[in-house]
Image (spheres, rainbow, N blue to C red):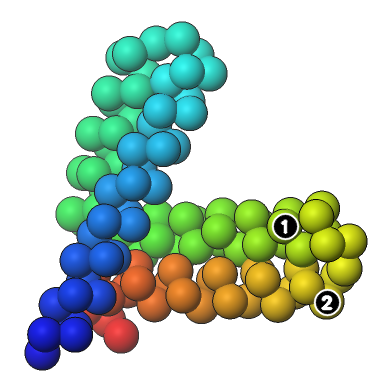
């Protein structure tokens, strides 16, 4: 029970920071505090609506797998490492995201 609680907290932490980073990136991109605030509030609101939260979680996990591909292809110049990093990233993040919603 205690380990599940810890994983849920890590999942909440990950989801919050992903929403915060996305809203900060878009807020800086458009030079607007309004964009930052609306996207942050919107992402946190979407995490309360269960069907939409699944879609947001899958989108964020896909983003982490793309980062894994970039690391594998960009820094290591290996498609094998790109696939390995992308697979590890999507499995870990989708598991943490779904722990938040008590699916897994």
Q: Nearer the viewer, residue 9 or 66?
A: 9
Drawn side of residue 86 relative to residue 25, left or right:
right
Residue 99 as seen in the image, left or right of residue 64: left
Q: Residue furthest front?
A: 76
Q: Position of residue 79 (x, y in %)?
A: 86, 70
The quadrant the N terminus occupies is bottom left
Of residue 51 and residue 15, the one placed in the foreground of this image is 15
* The label number, if any, that marks residue 71 in the structure image: 1
Query: Is residue 50 among the parts visible in the rendering?
Result: no
Q: Is residue 6 left or right of residue 66?
A: left
**Which of 43 and 22 lies nearest the eye of the viewer?**
22
**At 63% from the left edge and 76% from the top edge, which residue is drawn?**
87
Q: Quadrant of residue 13?
A: bottom left
- Tag 2 near tag 1, CB within 8 Å: no
Q: Position of residue 6 (x, y in %)?
A: 19, 75
Q: Residue 80 location, x and y as percent?
A: 83, 76
Q: Residues within 10 Å of mark 1 (few under 14, many from 20)?
A: some
User: In the displayed image of the protein, which residue is found farthest to the bottom?
Assistant: 1
Residue ID at (50%, 14%): 30
Tell me, for residue 55, which label it has, or none: none
Quarter of the image for the C terminus: give it: bottom left
Q: Position of residue 68 (x, y in %)?
A: 66, 62
Residue at the image point whose x is 30% and y is 42% from the top: 43
- Secondary structure beneath dot 2 equals helix
Outermost residue toward the top?
Answer: 31
Rounded to the nearest angstrom, the CA distance separating label 2 from label 1 is 11 Å
Residue 80's disc is: 2
Q: Earlier in the sequence, mark 2 or mark 1?
A: 1
Q: Residue at x 27, y 81 (%)?
A: 103
**What secondary structure is marked by label 1?**
helix
């Amino acid at each position: 029970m205690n380990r599940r609680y810890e994983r849920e907290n890590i999942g909440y932490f990950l989801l919050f920071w992903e929403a915060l980073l996305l809203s900060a990136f878009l807020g800086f991109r458009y030079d607007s505090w309004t964009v930052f605030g609306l996207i942050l509030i919107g992402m946190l609101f979407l995490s309360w609506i269960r069907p939409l939260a699944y879609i947001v979680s899958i989108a964020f996990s896909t983003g982490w797998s793309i980062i894994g591909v970039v690391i594998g292809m960009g820094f290591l110049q290996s498609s094998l490492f790109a696939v390995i990093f992308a697979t590890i990233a999507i499995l870990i993040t989708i598991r943490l995201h779904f722990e938040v919603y008590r699916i897994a």
